[in-house]
Image (spheres, rainbow, N blue to C red):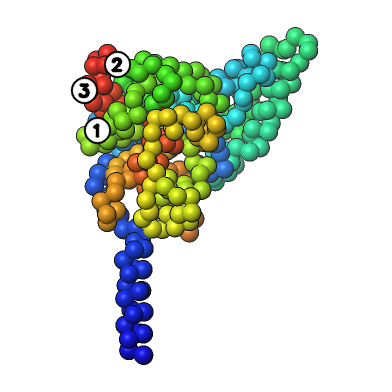
Amino acid sequence: MKKTLFSLSILFLGLGAHAQKYDFQNIVDIDATPVISQGKTGTCWSFSTSSFLESEIIRKTNKHIDLSEMYNVRNTYPKKIENYILRQGKTQFGEGGLAHDVINSMRDYGLVPVEAYSGLVGQETYDHKELFKVLKSLIDAYAKSDAPISSNWKELTEHVLDMYMGSNIKEFTYQGKKYTPETFLKMTTLNPDEYITISSFQNKKNYSSFILNIPDNFSNGSMYNLPLDEYIANIDYALDNGYTLSLDCDVSEKTFSGKYGIAFIPNDNADIEKGLTEIIKEKDITADYRLQEFYNFNTQDDHLMHIVGKVKDQKGNIYYKVKNSWGPNSDRVGNDGYIYMSIPYMKLKSISVLLHKDGLLKKTKEQLRIQ
């Protein structure tokens, strides 16, 4: 009996040693504003990139400013509407966008704090479901009409946006001082021309810019192409030197879990469930495999988030600390609303990252001829 108990003890000790539950430790943790929720909207692109800009303001001025995500959205939707109508409905019209759309909005319309423009009308949380149903019906009537369309479509669509999001703002008071969106942008010291997007696709020429054909790139924004290892090296260099990044990636995988706050690529699909809570062996990601997964639509631009640091597990594996916009509620999300994303997941499932040009490696800046 004693021999049996001893054998069982050894067995359970062995199992315990093999199954290693995640135990994370911060190794890079850059200042960021609190995790918030985008609600029932498809505006992750503005929430993630606004959060990125908030960290940029902290980095440059040490000021903590809560920017209005919906101000960027309010100024981008009319562009999406015009694009859809002028293309006669033969393009996508949805809530999605990319990080450069926020940079474009900042360049054209400035920035405002959330206290000056919340984008909430008769609601306490964000929900654009009805707004988009109304807009889609209206613009389809124009885009798909056989008769010449009325010239008042801009006025009518602006009226709908005003009803659901509030009238656009031209002047406001912040901390006792009057601003316009343009003067507020100047106060933050942000320069929209200092931000670039990098990516890695093996079928594109390295160190040149290209337009990625994905549904949410309605504004045809361009990005620089890098070899895969150099793409990842630039993400690491930026974080190690105090620069955060806005991330566009695929979150449709079963191995991306908001509930557990983890994202990984298992070497063996039998380990998918185990990998949500335990360290597992991950797949080696090549540039060929990355491109293959993009072209078979296993990798798509589902979601944008904000990379703010790195963590490591007890075996020394590195993960990116990614700020999500699904709220901090611990009943629904893990890691207080952050996703700990493994390097293989970043290599395979990230579409692109937007960052300050000074966050690039020196050799990369030289190759891209960026001053």
Q: Is residue 68 in sight in this rendering?
A: no
> First in sequence: mark 2 or mark 1?
1
What amino acid is found at the position of numbered circle 2 in the picture? Leu
Nearer-the-camera pick, 152 or 337: 337
Q: CA distance from mark 2 to mark 1?
A: 16 Å
Farthest residue, direction bottom: 1
Does residue 318 appear left or right of residue 218 in this picture?
Answer: left
Q: CA distance from mark 3 to mark 2?
A: 10 Å
- Is residue 129 visible in the rendered image? The answer is yes
Mark 1 or 3, nearer chain start: 1
Three-letter amino acid code of the residue under disc 3: Lys
Residue 151: where, in percent of width, then height?
68, 11
Q: Which disc number belongs to residue 368?
A: 2
Question: In the image, 203: left or right of 321?
Answer: right
Element under disc 3:
helix
Neighbor class of circle 2 (other Cα within 10 Å; few <14, some 14-19, many 20+) is some
Query: Farthest residue in the right direction?
Result: 146
Mark earlier in primary sequence (3, 2): 3
Tell me the number on the disc at residue 362.
3
